[in-house]
Amino acid sequence: MKLQSILENPHKRPIIIAGPCSAETEEQVLQTARELAKQNIDLFRSGIWKPRTRPGSFEGVGAPGLKWLKRVKEETGLKVTTEVAKAEHVYEAFKHNIDVLWLGARTTVNPFSVQEVADAIQGVDIPVLIKNPINPDLGLWIGAIERIYKAGVSRIGVIHRGFSYHGETPYRNVPRWQIAIELKRQFPDLAMICDNSHICGRRDTLFEVAQQAMDLNYDGIMTEVHPTPDEAWSDAKQQITPAQFKELVDQLVFREPTTDNIEFLETLDHLRKEIDHIDNELFNLLAQRMELADSIGQYKKRNNIAILQSSRWNEILETMSAKGQAKGLSKDFVTTILREIHQESINRQEAIMTSQEAKA
Ligand code: PEP
Ligand code: MN
């Protein structure tokens, strides 16, 4: 995949995208754009067609709102972007000279919709930003990128807006940073934008998440900005005023992707070698642990004992989790690792049971 920059200036970092969740009125759109133009943002966002979970809530102003975005361009010089989910949206956006298109999370999740949008774009050289699908499925995200790329689009970026999650969480959509990191590992040229608004779903954590993205070397942020957030027709809880957005961006610490400072590189190299050494040791120990699990598996088989011993597993979980936490490791991390190790032991013991059964 040969990707180009989504902005005219390929070196611009961070890429700043801001604007209201939805275009509501011409005045609201223009007022927001005028304020944001003073802050030198790179792209003005505004939802024209809103994919809502249930009918009856505000579903966007539709095509008439595109004229307001055209005015934003004429008056402020800002480039504009909006979400498209159907062929008709793409044609309307083209008619009104929208600069960048984006695919929403509910579109990326559906290959039929992505293909419809890709077919409508076919042959038009416009940058496209692709949000992650609602569910944590990297394959679906990559599939959408491939469909758009095959339509002849080379200026593709991705927007990480978090993933839906059932259970208690401080996020509206849990970030699952590793999924985005893996995408960037596979496609290093993709610009990666963090949509802190839809990850957080609230105002007080927007900065924290944006800073985390910067620390992870993201290329930019997309944040929802509204002149009177509390009165917004959609996503009121997570939108902030242009002034609050300025404060957020001013406070962000932008990290350099790398440096040519020799002393820094040598220190880093030294520390990385130590990490590699420890990783090696970890695998040696894990392999030894699995060999012991195999021996136990054989022993259980000979004595016709079930693989899973709940009381033993509980004991490991409790004592090791406490020991891990005493060493400063988080409970989540310790539990995840222990579960994975335990599952691998079970898989190996199961293989032993069945192979011996085959022999018997
Ligand atoms: C939006 O950007 O307003 C939006 C609907 O986002 P998402 O597709 O991430 O839910
Ligand atoms: Mn929104």
Image: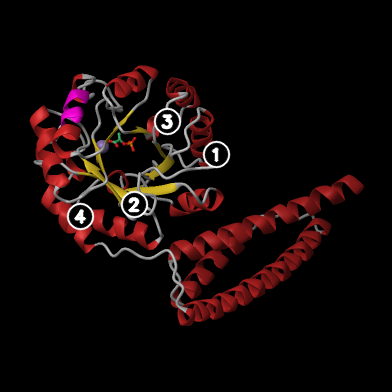
Q: CA distance from mark 3 to mark 1?
A: 25 Å
Q: Nearer the viewer, residue 8 or 350?
A: 8
Q: CA gap, disc 1 to disc 2? A: 23 Å
Q: Position of residue 102 (x, y in %)?
A: 36, 34
Tell me which secondary structure the magenta stretch mostly adopts. helix
Q: Quadrant of the N terminus?
A: top right
Q: Earlier in the sequence, mark 3 or mark 1?
A: 3
SS for dot 1? helix
Front-most of residues 359 and 61: 61
Amino acid type assigned to the residue bearing label 2 in the image: Gly
Task: Residue 220: give its label.
Answer: 2
For image coordinates 10% across by 34% down, the residue present is: 28
Identify residue type, mark 1.
Gly
Residue 9 versus residue 213: which sits nearer the camera? 9
Look at mark 1 in the image and give the residue it sits on: 139
Please state which of the two labelled residues, at mark 1 or mark 2, is closer to the viewer.
2
Residue 307 coordinates in the image, percent (x, y): 70, 55
Q: Earlier in the sequence, mark 1 or mark 2?
A: 1
- Label whose residue precedes the other's in the sequence (3 or 2): 3
Ligand 2 quadrant assignment: top left
Question: Residue 172 is drawn in which quadrant?
Answer: top left
Mark number displayed over residue 125: 3
- Mark 2 lies on a secondary structure that is strand
State the extent of the magenta-drawn residues as a range. Answer: 66-71
Label 4 residue near ligand 2, CB within 8 Å: no
Q: Secondary structure at mark 4?
A: loop
The crowding category of the residue bearing disc 4, from other C-alpha atoms within 10 Å (few below 14, some 14 to 19, many at least 20), is few
Gap between marks 3 and 2 measured at Cα: 22 Å
Tell me the crowding category of disc 3: few under 14, some 14 to 19, or many 20 or more residues within 10 angstroms, Cα based. few
Residue picked out by circle 4? 204
